[in-house]
Image: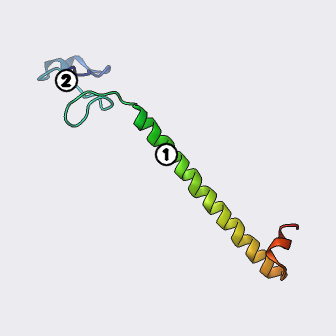
Amino acid sequence: MSHVRSVAASPADDDADDGVVADDVWTLQAGGSVHRALTLSNVAGIFYILISGLCVSLVIAVLEFSYRTHRKAATHRVTHTSILSF
């Protein structure tokens, strides 16, 4: 297994045990096995989160529109469909 040395390592760090200054957090798992940082499932997970956030925001926008339309129709004492033509 190869260890990654820090670019900013000082000469005083040369007498370390294995010569390891810092583990590369992007490629080392807790078990010590090496894997690629960005896999297809990692990238897909990001898009799942973005799409679910978009869906939640659309639901909130529809609910807000319905609430405001209902409130405006009650204030003007007209039907919900006639308030949309204002």
Name the residue carrying label 2.
Answer: 20
What is the crowding at mark 1: few (fewer than 14 residues within 10 Å), some, or many (at least 20)? few
Q: Which residue is nearer to you in this view: 82 or 24?
A: 82
> Which structural element holds mark 2?
loop
Q: In this view, does 42 lie above or below 10?
A: below
**Mark 2 or 1: the one toward you:** 1
The disc placed on residue 48 is 1
Report the quarter where the N terminus lies.
Answer: top left
Instruction: Give residue 39's position: percent from left, percent from top.
Output: 39, 31
Residue drawn at (54%, 52%) of the image? 53
> Which structural element holds mark 1?
helix
Reading the chain from its start, which is encountered first: label 2 or label 1? 2
In-image side of 74 versus 51 (left or right) = right
The disc placed on residue 35 is none
Q: Which residue is nearer to you in this view: 24 or 22?
A: 24
In-image side of 17 versus 23 (left or right) = left
Residue drawn at (40%, 31%) of the image? 38
Q: Which residue is nearer to you in this view: 24 or 38?
A: 38
Q: How far is disc 2 from disc 1 in space, using C-alphas? A: 37 Å
Instruction: Give residue 8's position: percent from left, percent from top.
Output: 31, 21
Report the quarter where the C terminus lies.
Answer: bottom right
Q: Which residue is nearer to you in this view: 85 or 17?
A: 85
What is the crowding at mark 2: few (fewer than 14 residues within 10 Å), some, or many (at least 20)? some
Q: Name which quarter of the figure residue 55 lies in.
A: bottom right
Q: Is residue 1 above or below residue 25?
A: above
